[in-house]
Amino acid sequence: MTDLTSLTIAEAREGLASKSFTARELTDAHLAAIEAARVLNAYVLETPDRAREMAKAADEKIAKGEGGPLAGIPLGIKDLFATRDIRTTACSKILGNFIPPYESTVTSQLWRDGAVLLGKLNNDEFAMGSSNETSCFGPVTNPWRREGSNTTLVPGGSSGGSASAVAASLCMGATATDTGGSIRQPAAFTATVGIKPTYGRCSRWGIVAFASSLDQAGPIARTTRDAAILMRSMAGHDPKDTTSVDIAVPDYEAAIGKSVKGMKIGIPKEYRLDGMPAEIEKLWSQGTEWLKAAGAEMVPVSLPHTKYALPAYYIVAPAEASSNLARYDGVRFGLREPGKNIVEMFENTRADGFGDEVRRRVLIGTYVLSAGYYDAYYLRAQKVRTLIKKDFEDCFAKGVNAILTPATPSAAFGIGEKGGADPVEMYLNDIFTVTVNMAGLPGIAVPSGKDTQGLPLGLQLIGRPFDEETLFSLGEVIEQAAGRFTAPKWW
């Protein structure tokens, strides 16, 4: 029998339907793989008993012909999603051993469709980071390594545990969230597929908030088809989330393999940065050739406000974070550090409970929202955001179906290599991804090649609002042309 952990979701679905193996066997294979790969630190909580229970239930339903679209498929869940009766911490000390009495909408839909919970995945604390080094459980290790080197690399962030677990075959797919690139950047760093849906496509209810107008849940998977299968279960209207959009969820998988002939693909000149590595430039050109060969037409486009996206993002996101994180005060749940009075208790709890990066962003956010600075910073950043959104609208109004860009400015870097002395160095990793969140658009990262040291690189496709199907069709073209990439096993 093939190693069960190497199957895609689509292959596993067929195997389960044809009774080649059971959901229990599939789950046990993944639980064994998780145990053997703890050095990667991808999981912060393993749930083997719950997984076997869910697998048994899936087998029973499959036997009766009642299995859902994800029946028996073992998944990892980012520790930002509330899971009922299972510890959820956002990888922050301040949430302590918080056990939610409710289930996030996205995960409840996955369980409705028969998926199996393997455990909770590591992420940057409150999703604040681009390398998964800010987690209170320690950094995640990328299963990829530079050729001839034992340097441990970051998997990207904030959904580093999700990307690392999928790349190392420790789950068949994973939930993730994207506020400024936290699905697409780790996907690019680990040769996995990650899609950030249109804002409002997936419910945010039950997901620990970072920046509410930017956060969006999405899947990380091994292939474009697998991402489409997961996305269909994750998406949908939720009356509990007022930003959730009430439009029908299409069959995303049906878009895989559809012709892209005649589609117009925008190539934005503003994404050609000074000092951009030649290999990123080469990969971008290669991507245009693949899409041209499939019948798409490349058109130059301009997104003039791109250069303001990163500074505007790092005003809007921390401002919303400082507001969202005000609830962690030691009174209602999580960590409580004693003090002589209530103010001191608040101060001690927050000082001890939040890590450096979260404190930094709370301080920035509080500063830009304070009297005297609100207009100069926050209000101006929101105006810039409107202009960024208009840039994309103007492009799409000219008949452009999607926009092709690099996903990251480089391949994965070493743990501890960036951001130590200068946090801005780390923030620059989001340069190609934050515009998509600022404009509320869908974006997909697809593995497209390797750098000179054998590390994976990805390309990003940006789509029209609620047109994820086009991204899946185009992503499949790139995936077929580039081929699949698997991390050589060293752990």
Image (tube, rainbow, N blue to C red):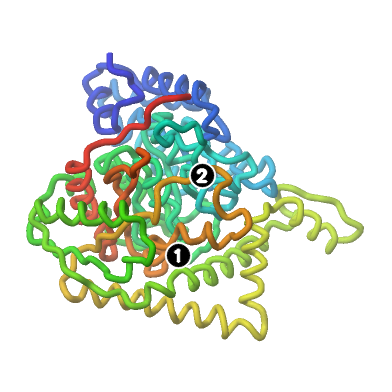
Give the x, y percent position of residue 490.
44, 25
Relative depth, front residue between 358 and 288: 288
Q: Give coordinates of residue 275: x percent, y percent.
A: 38, 63
Circle on res. 242: 1
Q: How many labels does the image show?
A: 2
Q: Residue at x 46, y 19 (%)?
A: 32
Distance from label 2 to label 1 (Cα)? 17 Å
Say which amino acid is labelled 2: Glu
Question: What residue is rendered at 34% in x and 41% in y?
Answer: 191
User: Where residue 22 appears, x then y in whole percent?
Assistant: 33, 18
Determine the residue positioned at 42% across, 24% down. 30
> In the rendered image, which residue does mark 2 sit on?
103
Picture disc at residue 212 = none
Which amino acid type corresponds to the residue marked 1 in the rendered image?
Thr
Tell me if 56 is positioned left or right of 405 in this view: right
In the image shown, does 37 or 253 lie closer to the viewer? 37
Residue 110 visible at all: yes
Asked if residue 82 shows in the view, the reply is no
**In the drawing, does residue 395 fall left or right of residue 366?**
left
Secondary structure beneath disc 1? loop
Q: Residues within 10 Å of mark 1 (few under 14, many from 20)?
A: few
411 and 36: which one is in front?
A: 411
Where 10 sits versus 332, above or below? above
